[in-house]
């Protein structure tokens, strides 16, 4: 059902999330300042991780359907997770079969949180990852945690602690990447310095089992050391037991396309139909009335392939 959750939205907040372009320069009144400090910032960010999840986020945002998936913001689980300050609901896990729209929800939640953070004018960071089984070789837990750290520190000055670790690694054996214990420590410290941090990880099931466990362990440590942290995960049902092992009592939301989501998708397809004369108003009404009621998970594959429904008639 991924196409139901794609095509046709141009969210301005997509530009705000994962925006590293503005991280590489410090500009004040159109003048670059603190050149000595800023010169090595791109090198440090690249050293932390080669992953650029903001590009994937932008692709998803550019292909979203407005209005689809908004139901999640009214769910009690989401509202408790978003608003309660005592840390009693630090994590949400959205589970669902392939193609039901979990990645769409991840991007939607990140953008909503980012917009709220900007409006609040508080020191809040929204960071995230998109796991992909095709990129498992590069998406090691070290690179995944490094990508999260990049997003926390990309705006503003990089702490002296991180600079010292970078300097030491640069001078050792011609240069080495950060070690996992170092990354975990630096990430914990960076997050602890923020007023609040939201961490969103999409498609946890697509990480390798070893990296998945290491990532969950790191997230648990972050949650314990920084109670204000909120974590949003998505994945297939089979990883639920893994999540519950590290986060007992986690809030779970089952994801499936709603009738309204399907109607929005069909309406977009009908509006873009290039042969509109082949369909009268009655047929259009029948399509919008009958298909959302009849469609089920067995038809997910129809909507998740590029050739799905090339024309509506």
Image (cartoon, rainbow, N blue to C red):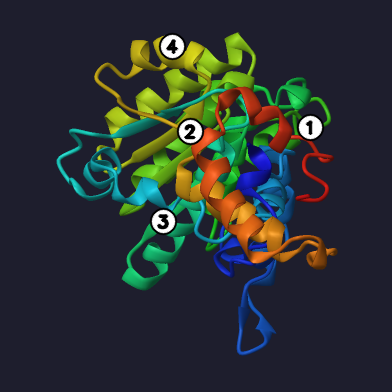
Q: Which residue is mark 4?
A: 242
Residue 283 drawn at (x, y percent): 65, 56
Q: Which residue is mark 2?
A: 256
Name the secondary structure under disc 4. Answer: helix
Q: Earlier in the sequence, mark 2 or mark 3?
A: 3
Q: Quadrant of the N terminus?
A: top right
Q: Earlier in the sequence, mark 1 or mark 4?
A: 1
Q: Are marks 1 and 2 in contact (CB under 8 Å)?
A: no
What residue is rendered at 52% in x and 49% in y? 289
Horizontal side of residue 196 vs 50, given as left or right: left
Distance between the Cα atoms at labels 1 and 4?
35 Å
What residue is rendered at 35% in x and 10% in y? 245
What residue is rendered at 42% in x and 15% in y? 240
Residue 202 figure quarter: top right
Horizontal side of residue 6 vs 173, given as left or right: left
Residue 93 drawn at (x, y percent): 40, 28
Distance between the Cα atoms at labels 2 and 4?
21 Å
């Amino acid at each position: 059902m991924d196409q139901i959750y794609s095509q046709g939205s141009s969210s301005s907040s997509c530009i705000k999330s994962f925006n590293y372009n503005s991280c590489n320069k410090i500009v004040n009144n159109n003048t670059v300042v603190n050149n000595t400090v800023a010169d090595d910032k791109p090198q440090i960010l690249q050293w932390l991780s080669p992953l650029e999840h903001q590009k994937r986020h932008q692709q998803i945002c550019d292909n979203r359907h407005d209005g689809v998936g908004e139901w999640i913001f009214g769910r009690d689980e989401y509202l408790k997770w978003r608003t309660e300050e005592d840390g009693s609901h630090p994590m949400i896990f959205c589970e669902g079969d392939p193609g039901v729209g979990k990645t769409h929800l991840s991007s939607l939640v990140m953008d909503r949180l980012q917009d709220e953070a900007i409006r609040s004018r508080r020191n809040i960071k929204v960071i995230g990852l998109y796991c992909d089984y095709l990129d498992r070789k590069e998406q090691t837990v070290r690179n995944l945690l490094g990508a999260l750290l990049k997003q926390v520190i990309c705006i503003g000055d990089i702490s002296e602690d991180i600079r010292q670790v970078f300097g030491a690694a640069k001078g050792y054996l011609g240069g080495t990447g950060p070690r996992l214990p170092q990354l975990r420590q630096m990430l914990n410290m960076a997050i602890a310095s923020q007023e609040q941090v939201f961490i969103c990880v999409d498609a946890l099931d697509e990480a390798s089992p070893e990296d998945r466990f290491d990532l969950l362990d790191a997230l648990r440590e972050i949650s314990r050391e920084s109670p204000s942290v909120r974590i949003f995960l998505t994945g297939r049902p089979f990883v639920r037991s893994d999540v519950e092992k590290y986060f007992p009592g986690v809030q779970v939301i089952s994801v499936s396309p709603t009738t309204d989501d399907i109607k929005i998708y069909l309406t977009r397809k009908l509006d873009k139909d290039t042969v509109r004369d082949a369909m009268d108003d009655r047929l259009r009404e029948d399509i919008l009335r009958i298909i959302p009621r009849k469609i089920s998970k067995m038809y997910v594959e129809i909507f998740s392939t590029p050739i799905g429904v090339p024309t509506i008639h």
